[in-house]
Image: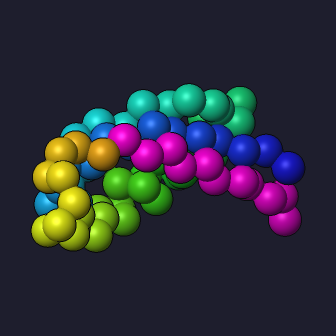
Amino acid sequence: MRSTAYSVLIEPSGQIVNITPLMATGVPLIDEAAREMITNSEPFPHVPPDYPQIRTLITIMIPMYPR
């Protein structure tokens, strides 16, 4: 199994500000597909109104399983 990981900075509105690769699988097509999965998930859920309305940094790790 290979994994890829990205750091994702998100606005309180759920919009992605930045995606930074943290770990690559070594297969560029797989890494790009994982990045597209994150991008296509936008917008993320809004931050609840009672939370600080600041940008949030999350880490997303995606395991890739061979067929």
Residue 22 seen in this snapshot: yes
Q: Using the image as rendered, state which of residue 65 and residue 9 is in the foreground.
A: 9
Q: Using the image as rendered, state which of residue 30 and residue 39 is in the foreground.
A: 39
Up/down of 45 relative to 58, above or below: below
Decide whether residue 59 is among the magenta residues.
yes
- Please identify the residue farthest to the front as the structure is shown: 50
Side of 67 relative to 58 (left or right): right
Q: How many marks?
A: 0
Q: Residue at x 45, y 37 (%)?
A: 7
Q: Residue at x 70, y 36 (%)?
A: 25
- On the image, the x and y values in percent for residue 57 come to 37, 41
The dominant secondary structure in magenta is strand
Up/down of 18 relative to 44, above or below: above
Q: Residue at x 85, y 50 (%)?
A: 1
- On the image, the x and y values in percent for residue 66 come to 83, 58
Q: How is the image coloured?
A: rainbow
Q: Using the image as rendered, state which of residue 3 and residue 67 is in the foreground.
A: 3
- Span of residues in magenta: 57-67
Decide whether residue 56 is among the magenta residues.
no
Side of 58 relative to 55 (left or right): right
Side of 45 relative to 60 (left or right): left
Side of 3 relative to 19 (left or right): right
Q: Residue at x 22, y 60 (%)?
A: 51
- On the image, the x and y values in percent for residue 22 come to 56, 29
Q: Dividing the image into 4 quarters, which one contains the C terminus?
A: bottom right
Residue 32 seen in this snapshot: no
- On the image, the x and y values in percent for residue 54 come to 18, 45
